[in-house]
Image: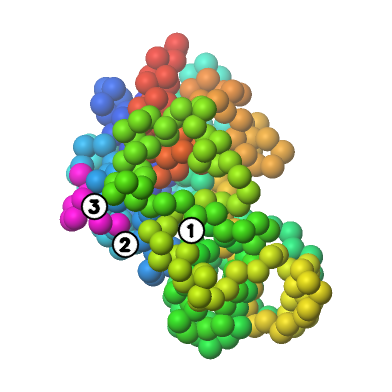
Amino acid sequence: MTHHDVIIIGGGQAGLATARAATGLGLAPLVLEASDSATGSWSHYYDSLTLFSPARCSALPGKPFPGDPDGYPARDEVVDYLAAYAEHLDAEIRTGQKVVAVTGAGPGGFEVEVEGAGTLSAARVVAASGGFGRPHRPHLPGLEDFGGTVLHSSQYCGPEQISGRRVVIVGGGNSAVQIGIELAEKASVTLATRHPLRFMPQRPFGRDIHLWLKTFGLDTAGWARPLLTGGKGTPVMDTGAYRQAIAQGRPDRRPMFRRLDATGVVWADGTREDVDVVLLATGYRPELGYLSKAGALDSTGMPLHRQGLSTTHAGLGYVGLEWQRSFASATLRGVGADARHVMTALRARPGA
């Protein structure tokens, strides 16, 4: 059995950034990607998705994002960028390799079981499958009784999919608002949220907010976290266009409904309405089931770590988790710094 310096699970933005950090430290990484391409989840998102950070802030280490540096790249541009990044990366990347279990193998490191391909060993393992592998479906009263269509945003492709129907979107983040405004051109759409939408200016003082965050170190400043996450409701980056569309009822926004029944919703004010589609824009959770046998996860399936370093296993790290070390940890612009931090610590692991 070949013993690897480090096995990186996941070949998306987090895995590619980690592989580059590993090679920069003199390690020979092996990247295992379950899908047939090293582009992560991007190719599976809805067609019209655009980044809410500009291209100049959305690059992985060593390769600028092409095109207008102040433009906001579309989904397919990100897919192409990641594919090109992987092609020129000095690391072994194996696609179609689904990891089903990671177990500790004593002081020598870990054993990594790959579906249909046997077991590999490594001194170090980085779980870089990110925080977007498991669509989150919250408990909603009556959801199991609803006879209409229920979609998670991960299943949404474009407005033609549910054109002409009455749609309620659950969620108030960037994706919910972006999908809602797009859908409102072809369907009757309401955003249902527990709190009013909380808009944040995309370009305060003429510069994108991500540039300000980076320039002044607010991404990682502990005191700044309440500014970015405080208040009720998920922040929505907005140039003003989103706020205007919502104000004009394209789509409208209402307080969260009380419950669903067989054919519709009962709103907070007690009124009832027939609904065709409930679309859950309720985010994701990390898909880390392959670490359950190792005892590296808590009871909810979330990793036990401190800033990306496992608190249960020396030599195990994580890259790509939301708020792993900063506001940007789960984004293209944030994974590079986290990858360097994690790989530097793992490189120094005694006995590895």
Kindly check if marks 1 and 2 are in contact, taking CB atoms under 8 A apart as contact: no
Where residue 46 sits: x, y (%)? 43, 67
Q: In the picture, which quadrant includes the N terminus?
A: top left
Q: Main secondary structure of the magenta part?
A: loop
Residue matched to label 2: 74
Give SS at disc 3. Answer: loop
Under mark 2, the amino acid is Ala
* CA distance separating discs 3 and 2: 13 Å
Under mark 3, the amino acid is Asp
* CA distance separating discs 1 and 2: 14 Å
Where residue 33 sits: x, y (%)? 40, 48
Q: Report whether residue 143 is seen.
A: no
Q: Of circles 1 and 2, which is in front?
A: 1
Magenta-drawn segment: 64-72
What crowding class fits label 1: few (fewer than 14 Cα within 10 Å), some (14-19), or many (20 or more)? some
Q: Earlier in the sequence, mark 1 or mark 2?
A: 2
Give SS at disc 2. Answer: loop
Residue matched to label 3: 70
Q: Residue at x 53, y 20 (%)?
A: 314
Give SS at disc 1. Answer: helix
